[in-house]
Image (cartoon, helix red, strand yellow):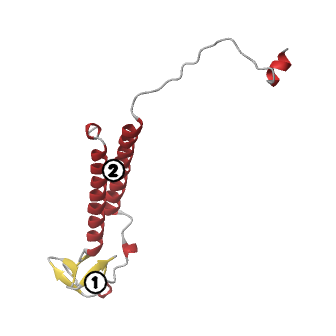
């Protein structure tokens, strides 16, 4: 394991790398929320874009949202600014959710590896055994077991 030879310094490196990985994944998640798609999924090869799609432009046979609008389930809605974004908008499907699950699994493994390394550093890896030997039993006169067996 790559942490083993360097002791507590390596544990700190593991914690730092976990923080960097978490920050990177959250930045990707937030960036995905801020970005918006403009393709409504509608076509306009023969007829113009349907009014129900909102403010659209026909580009190469596809109904695309006009500047300042984002696709929301096939309808163009005004693009939200960063200040009024609600973080509960994070999609629960697609590549964002999959990458988030992957990051959580990687972080859990990294944390487990870091804690195991710290445990080995503080408690050592050698096993200590207690050797029990059978010998003559010595009873004191006030011992209840001694009086019941006599």
**Position of residue 76 in the picture relative to residue 108 (left or right):** left
State the mark number for residue 1. Answer: none
Q: Which mark is residue 106?
A: 2
Percent x, y of residue 59:
15, 79
- Disc with the residue nearer the chain's start (2 vs 1): 1
**Residue positioned 26% across, 58% down in the render:** 20
Q: Nearer the viewer, residue 143 or 9?
A: 143
Task: Decide which of 142, 22 is in the foreground and name it.
Answer: 142
Q: Quick one: SS at disc 2?
A: helix
Whole-percent x and y of residue 70?
27, 80
Query: How far, Cα to Cα, is label 2 from label 1?
Result: 32 Å
* Location of residue 127 (image quadrant): top left
Q: Name the residue: 35% across, 43% down.
A: 113
Asked whether, in this view, residue 19 is left or right of residue 136, the answer is left
Query: In front here: 85 or 21?
Result: 21
At mark 1, the secondary structure is: loop
> Which residue sits at x=37%, y=78%?
86
CA neighbours of label 1 inside 10 A, class few (<14), some (14 to 19), many (20+): few
Q: On screen, 137 above or below 1?
A: above
Quadrant of image for the N terminus: top left
Q: Residue at left 76%, top 20%?
A: 140
Against 109, residue 67 (above or below) is below
The image quarter in which residue 82 lies: bottom left
Asked if residue 126 lies left or right of residue 42, the reply is right
Looking at the image, the residue that sits furthest to the left is 60
Extreme residue in the top direction: 136
Tag 1 residue? 81
Q: Residues within 10 Å of mark 2 (few under 14, many from 20)?
A: some
Where is residue 40? Give x, y as percent: 27, 77
The image quarter containing residue 85 is bottom left
In this rendered view, identify the residue nearer to me: 18 or 125. Answer: 125
In this rendering, position of residue 134 left or right of residue 109: right
């Amino acid at each position: 394991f790559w942490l083993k030879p360097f002791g507590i310094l390596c544990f700190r490196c593991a914690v730092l790398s976990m923080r960097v990985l978490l920050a990177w994944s959250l930045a990707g998640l937030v960036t995905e929320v801020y970005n918006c798609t403009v393709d409504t999924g509608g076509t306009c090869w023969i007829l113009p874009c349907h009014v129900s799609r909102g403010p659209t432009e026909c580009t190469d046979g596809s109904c695309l949202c006009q500047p300042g609008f984002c696709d929301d389930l096939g309808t163009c809605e005004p693009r939200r600014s960063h200040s009024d974004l609600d973080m509960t908008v994070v999609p629960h499907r697609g590549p964002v959710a999959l990458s988030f699950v992957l990051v959580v699994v990687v972080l859990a493994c990294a944390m487990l590896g870091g804690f195991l390394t710290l445990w080995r550093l503080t408690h050592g890896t050698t096993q200590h055994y207690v050797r029990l030997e059978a010998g003559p039993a010595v009873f004191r006169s006030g011992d209840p077991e001694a009086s019941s067996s006599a």
